[in-house]
Image (cartoon, helix red, strand yellow):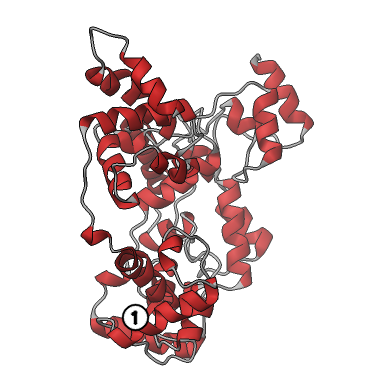
Amino acid sequence: MNDKSVDKNFMTKNTAINKTSIEFNKQSANEYYHTSSTSDYSNCNTNNDNKCFVSDSPLHVLIPYTFYGPKEKQIIEENNLTVITTKFSKYETEILRKNWQQFCDDYECDENMKTRLLGFFSFSDNYSKQERKSFRYFMRNSQFLFRLANGLPNRTLVNIYITARVKFNTLKRMCELSADEKDNILELRRLYGRKWAKISEKYQCYPSSVTTYYDTYYDKNGEPYDTGKWTPDENRRLLAAMKQWLNTDDLSQHIFTKRIPYKQIKQLAEINRSEFTVAQHWYYRLRWSVAQWDQLEDQWTHKDTAQLIYCLFRYDFTDESAIDWDVIKEKFANISSFNALMRNWRLIKQTVPTFESKSYKQIIDFLYDNLLPQYLNPDDDGLKEFEMFFNN
């Protein structure tokens, strides 16, 4: 697809952009929206001589917004565009960092402005409707997203913006606040209700961090939940509630059950702890004691490693979450528990270089090509033995 066809398709959608430079006229924007002089970007120097080049990538031209759904995927497929979805490389991160810093320098953005550019507190009640409207106008006319995307032609705008939000924000988490600041947040909750953006802006914290902290330690009325070590009576009541809800007397068959309604279960158990705490206690503590896996022995061998790699390769699961571990476990009669199987799988996949940035399919292919041959018998067709094990 040539550049002319890209431009033609793009112009048909009536969403043309300036692909060479942009200078935001602050004065005309203020006149248009009657923005007050207290606007938080009023001190930005937008009348500079530096020409700010924006991305002219076909991907960004055809999809000039951050929303990414079925329609956008169809556009990508029809135009045979290349889209990278893996983790940002160091080279890409450096390009993004330079784009971000150049934008902030050009507009002389202070820390408050940087936070709003990254999507935090832009629409809190601390700003008037007129200021929020003017800020959106600034974001659009300064070509902020296209400037961030310059030099990253195969990354979608949504991928670029989300990465910038994570890497460049300076927000704090609740664990970084003092005890007095945490107490003040409780008072702000009583004053403003659940307006978390307004509350968290006071201390420049992640809104999600403030929400999680409050819901973990306080109920909806501001009364504190019980904390500390769980008592035997609490464990007994929680187990009884789990059995009642799951309609079973054998909880060992439900240690991998998902979508458990912990809110209803904690109400059944009459436990004064948060839903989050109940879920964590079951997931990390109680379900393992029910299974009594601390009494089981790990009998894993190198041969088991080879057989597991071969089975996972042959089953061709789409990703790790799709693995049917019940089927896999049936093939390993000498392995006494799911815990042993899962623990050893984690250790095996960690032998793959930079496994954190690889997909499940890439990990399995690497293990099959590099680790499995170490366990093959050079004097015989070792794969026959694995094939028999797989078909058993």
Q: Residue at x 79, y 30 (%)?
A: 12
The x, y position of residue 67, in whole percent, is: 62, 46
The x, y position of residue 372, in whole percent, is: 29, 22
- Element marked by disc 1: helix
Q: Residue at x 27, y 74 (%)?
A: 177
Q: Would you say 339 lies left or right of 240 here?
A: left
Above or below 236: residue 37 = above
Above or below 336: residue 135 = below
* Residue placed most toward the observer, 95 or 362: 362
Asked if residue 195 shows in the view, the reply is no
Quarter holding the N terminus is top right
In the rendered structure, which amino acid carries the disc numbered 1? Answer: Asn
Q: Would you say 283 lies left or right of 59 here?
A: left
* Quadrant assignment, res 62: top right
Quarter holding the C terminus is top left
The x, y position of residue 119, in whole percent, is: 49, 58
Q: Residue at x 70, y 24 (%)?
A: 78
Residue at the disc numbered 1 = 235
